[in-house]
Image (cartoon, rainbow, N blue to C red):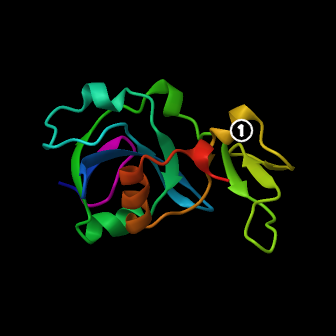
């Protein structure tokens, strides 16, 4: 199969808790390749992805997908249509200023076109995915721990 990821490609990631699946959705000029982390950890490899690919993602995150594919960290399984709800870049958040203990004091909300600073996140904004780049180690850790964006402080 082709090594260059294409939007809609679904990849398998082996974790200590089973197989996880992600879908490549977009490329951002600033952050790079954006993936959807699909729900579930599976004891056996899946062979059909049409239903899984249409489920609501746990979250989006920027990830060096091409490098991970080249290094054999991910296995391309198939290409499925990106759900309508994920066809546009999602609204995301990223930490702004922090205090000396590392606590986030403000946030930036990124909507794909612009960013705005907010001092405190409302309930809806707390659920926005993080506009950050993760490596494979952090991605596996977050998937296995059940991490969600609303848990980020």
Residue 120 image position (x, y, % from top left) = 83, 46
* Residue 150 is inside the magenta segment: no
Q: Residue 67 appears in which quarter of the rendering?
A: bottom left
Residue 141 located left or right of residue 51:
right
Q: Residues within 10 Å of mark 1 (few under 14, many from 20)?
A: some
Residue at point 78% right, 48% down? 114
- Where 31 sits versus 92, above or below? below
In the structure shown, which secondary structural element does the residue marked by tag 1 occupy?
Answer: helix
In the image, is 114 to the left or to the right of 81? right
The residue at the point 60 percent across, 39 percent down is: 90
To which quarter of the image does residue 40 belong?
top left
Please tell me whether residue 21 is drawn above or below residue 27 in the rendered image: above
Residue 5 inside the magenta-drawn segment: yes
Q: Which residues are magenta?
A: 3-10
* 45 vs 43, nearest the viewer: 43
Label 1: which residue? Answer: 125
Q: Quadrant of the N terminus?
A: bottom left
Residue 99 in the image: state x and y as whole percent: 82, 69
Residue with the most extreme bottom position: 100
Which residue is painted at 36% across and 52% down in the image? 144
Q: What main secondary structure does the magenta stretch of the protein show?
A: loop
Residue sitting at x 46%, y 38%? 58
Image position of 30 with respect to 45: above or below: below
Residue 137 percent across, percent down from the top left = 38, 67
């Amino acid at each position: 199969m082709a090594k260059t990821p294409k939007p809609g490609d679904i990849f398998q990631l082996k974790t200590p808790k089973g197989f996880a699946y992600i879908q490549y959705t977009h490329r951002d000029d600033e952050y790079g390749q954006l993936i959807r982390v699909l729900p579930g950890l599976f004891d056996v490899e899946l062979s059909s992805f049409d239903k899984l690919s249409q489920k609501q993602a746990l979250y989006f995150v920027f990830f060096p997908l091409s490098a991970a594919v080249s290094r054999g960290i991910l296995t391309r399984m198939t290409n499925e249509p990106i759900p309508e709800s994920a066809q546009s870049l999602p609204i995301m958040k990223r930490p702004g200023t922090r205090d000396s203990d590392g606590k986030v004091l403000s946030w930036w909300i990124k909507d794909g076109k612009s960013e705005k600073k907010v001092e405190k996140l409302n309930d809806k904004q707390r659920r926005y995915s993080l506009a950050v780049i993760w490596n494979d180690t952090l991605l596996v850790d977050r998937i296995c721990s059940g991490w969600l964006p609303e848990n980020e402080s």
